[in-house]
Structures are given as C-alpha cells and as structure tokens.
Amino acid sequence: MADPPKKPLLLAIDGSEHAFQTVKYISEIPSMRSMPVVLFSVFNRIPDQYWDLERQPHVGRRIAEVHAWAVEEEKRLRSAMEKARKHLLKAGFSPQSVRVVIQARESGVARDILKQAAKGCHAVLVGRKGMTHLRRIVLGSVSTKLLEGMHFTPLILVGKGARPGKVLIAVDGSEGSLRAVDFAAATLDGHPMEITLTHVVRASTRESIGEAEIRIGQFFEEAREHLMAAGIRPTQISTQIVTNVPSRSAAILEEARKGGYGTIIAGRRGLSKVQEFFMGRVTNKLIQMGEGLAIWVIN
C-alpha cells in the first residue's frame, strides 16, 4: 500500500523581509525538504465599489493613482513569492512540491490563513513580524490572532535572523509535552542537530526537586523512545533539568540563548504532574520574549 500523501507546510508570507525568514528557516532543515510547501499570501485588493468613484471628476485622478499603486503592489507581491519559491528550489525542494497561492482578502488576513490551514497542513509558519500591504500594520497582530485561533495544527513563529540550530523541547511531563515530542520526531527525522529535552522546576527544596527529577525522568525515557522510533539517533538526544528559578519561561530562554539553540518547541497547554500550572502561560511568555528564535507551538 502506498504511503498517504504528506500534508504541506503552509508558509503565510506577505512579501516582507520578516516573512521571508520562514522561507530561509525551513530551507535549512533537511527533513522539511521532502515535504510539500504552500506559499500563501492574502492580497488586499481594492473593493470594486471603490472604482465607481472614478466617474466623479474631483476624485478621478486620485482613483487612478490608487489603481496604479495597487497594480505595483500586486506585482511586488508576486515577485516576492517567486523569490521565495526559487530560494526553496535552490535549497533542494522539488519544483512539484512548492505551490504559490495568492488570494484576495475575504474575511481578514488571519482568518483567511486559518481557513487555508483548516484544509489540512503539517504546520503553519509565519514571521514574527511583517507588514501588510494596504496599511502599515505590524504582522504581530496577525500572529496574535493566529495563536488565538490555531488550535487544530502546530504554529511556528520565526523571529528575525532565526536559524534552526540546536533544538530545545520544553517539557513538563504532560500529554501536551509528549505531543510536542512526537511532532518534533515526525518533523525532524534526518535533521542532524542536537535535541535537548528540558524541564524546569521552580521548587527550591531538596525534597521537592528530588520528586520532580524522579517523575520527569520517567517522562524523559518515554520521550527518548518516541524520538528514536522516528529515526532520531540516540547521540542526538540529551536531557536537562533546571531547578530553583523564579521563571520557567525566562529559564528556558536563558538556556536556549546560552546553549546556542535556534529552535524552541513547546506544547500550547499542558497540566504539569509536578505542580498545578498551565504550560500555556510558559509558552505565551516564550513567544513574547523569544526574539531571534523560532518558537514551535504544538497543540
């Protein structure tokens, strides 16, 4: 029986340099080069009703200028999409696997991306910041809306200058953490960089730290098995426990920057077995403070 077709990576880009970071990022991950890719962009076309004003003498000239500007903007976008496509092909993606989709805005940029993603994709990638076409709106607002609505597929936010680098998976021993591990395993098979499973314990007493180490140790063993079953070599996998820190998110970011990690993977939400806290709070802070990094948010 033939393997089912792979779901595509959906790159939501708008022609900005920030958005192009997603293209650079996946081009450096060997395992992603075998995946289909959809380069998706929402173009804010001028409403048809607007052109009716052209018949009015006092606004006709202005309408002509707007029309000329809109034509140039669409040309710029198509040129940027072709640049992105060529970059992927040069990196080793097959021409048949890279598809460009440019559509007129329907419900809004974020909603249109969500609608496209709902058709089925492996993950959605978006630049941490970027500029929309008609108004100089920071794409961070689009990213925020995607985070709020993207409950059905992983979302990867790529910061400026982010490189895949070493991979840090933030885990708390929950089912959500194991889903993050499984997604990493399915996505990074063949990626030669190190993968570190990191657990952060805020507790400071020796007894509570000891209990945390025992429980997360069992999770580490299960996670290692999942990674190795997917083809990740044992020598690529390491574990670490960070203790006695005031902030889990700050500790994770410090470990990532100190250790030369370019990618952080975390579950959107997971109830810890050690302490009753929601991993979502940690993940949100990682997104807010993770400039220059790629943050993978796994549902």
Image: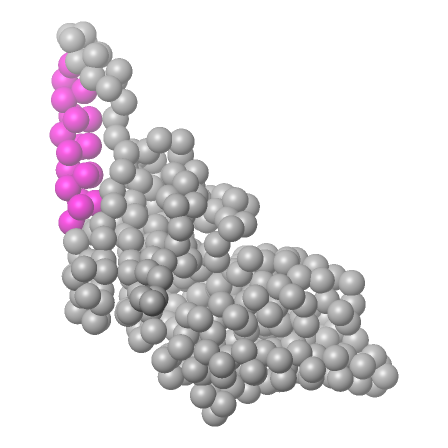
Query: From the viewer's perspective, is residue 159 above or below residue 186?
Result: above
Farthest residue toward the front? Answer: 1
Which residues lie in the magenta part?
59-79
Say if the magenta span includes residue 46: no
Residue 180 is left or right of residue 278, and the answer is: left
Looking at the magenta stretch, what is its main secondary structure? helix
Residue 237 placed where, x, y %? 51, 86
Image quadrant where one finds the N terminus: bottom left
Image quadrant where one finds the C terminus: bottom right
Question: Residue, x 18% and y 60% (percent of image)?
Answer: 96
Query: From the viewer's perspective, is residue 231 above or below residue 16?
Result: below
Query: From the viewer's perspective, is residue 19 above or below residue 185?
Result: above
Residue 186 placed where, x, y %? 44, 71
The number of numbered badges drawn on the structure is: 0
Question: Residue, x 49% and y 83% (percent of image)?
Answer: 228
Front position in the image: 38 or 56: 38
Residue 285 is left or right of residue 17, and the answer is: right
**Residue 52 appears in the figure:** yes
Q: Quadrant of residue 253?
A: bottom right
Front position in the image: 173 or 143: 173
**Residue 26 appears in the figure:** no
Residue 261 placed where, x, y %? 47, 77
Residue 281 is left or right of residue 3, and the answer is: right
Question: Residue, x 37% and y 79% (percent of image)?
Answer: 191
Query: From the viewer's perspective, is residue 7 above or below residue 190?
Result: above
Question: Residue, x 23% and y 58% (percent of image)?
Answer: 98
